[in-house]
Amino acid sequence: MKTRYLSIPIVLIVFAIFLQSNTGINEVAGNDLTIPEDVKVVLDNKCFGCHNVEAQSDKAKDKLLLDKINELSKAKLVAALSDINEVMVESKMPPEKFLEKKPEAKLTDDERQLLLEWSEKAADEMMN
């Protein structure tokens, strides 16, 4: 009989630990990324075609999914923003091979600068 009474507090403690650990995971999974309208227009017009779950390029989807970016943990989001920043600095996106087929997808200098500044600022904000 005493064993039954001891098991109730143990079950309650385990359940409380489970709830507490799940709350922490959920808090980490969300992020507060703000995408200004001018940045969103560039992303939608020049990047989204390859970087979405329905896109054909597995390589592009493995690198970045813009339609899932708000589901990333803060750490993964900061890494993704850093990657965006790096490819803007190195002018790697869109790739030359893609631009041969779709030259209209080429980023202007202003668009590249906009994405560069946004990704850097957003990553800094996520880290603070």
Image: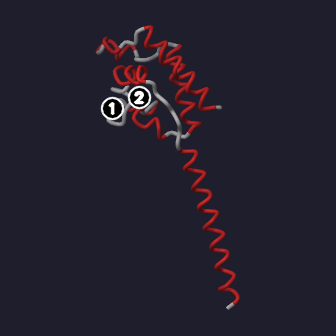
Point 53% across, 14% down: residue: 89
| Residue lying farthest to the left in this orientation | 101
Q: Give left or right: position of 25 versus 69.
A: right
Q: Secondary structure at mark 1?
A: loop
- When asked about the image quadrant of residue 6, the answer is bottom right
SS assignment at label 2? helix
Residue at 44%, 33% (x, y): give it: 62
Q: CA distance from mark 1 to mark 2?
A: 8 Å
Residue denoted by label 2: 60
Residue hosting label 1: 55
Residue 120 location, x and y as percent?
57, 21
Residue 69 location in percent, x, y? Answer: 46, 35
Work out whether 60 lies above or below 13: above
Image position, residue 93 (x, y; %): 43, 17
Could you classify mark 2 by the number of other residues whose Cα lies within 10 Å: few (under 14), some (14-19), or many (20 or more)?
some
Q: From this view, report whether residue 75 is shown above or below residue 94.
A: below
Numbered badge on residue 37: none
Proximity of marks 1 and 2: CB atoms separated by less than 8 Å: yes
Quarter of the figure that contains the C terminus: top right
User: Residue 36 appears at what percent x and percent y?
Assistant: 45, 24
Q: For the residue marked with disc 2, what is the amino acid?
A: Ala
The residue nearer to you, when weighing 90 against 124, is 124
Look at the image and name its color scheme. Answer: secondary structure
Of label 1 and label 2, which has the lower sequence position? 1
Q: Which residue is painted at 41% across and 29% down in the image? A: 59
> Quarter of the image containing the N terminus?
bottom right
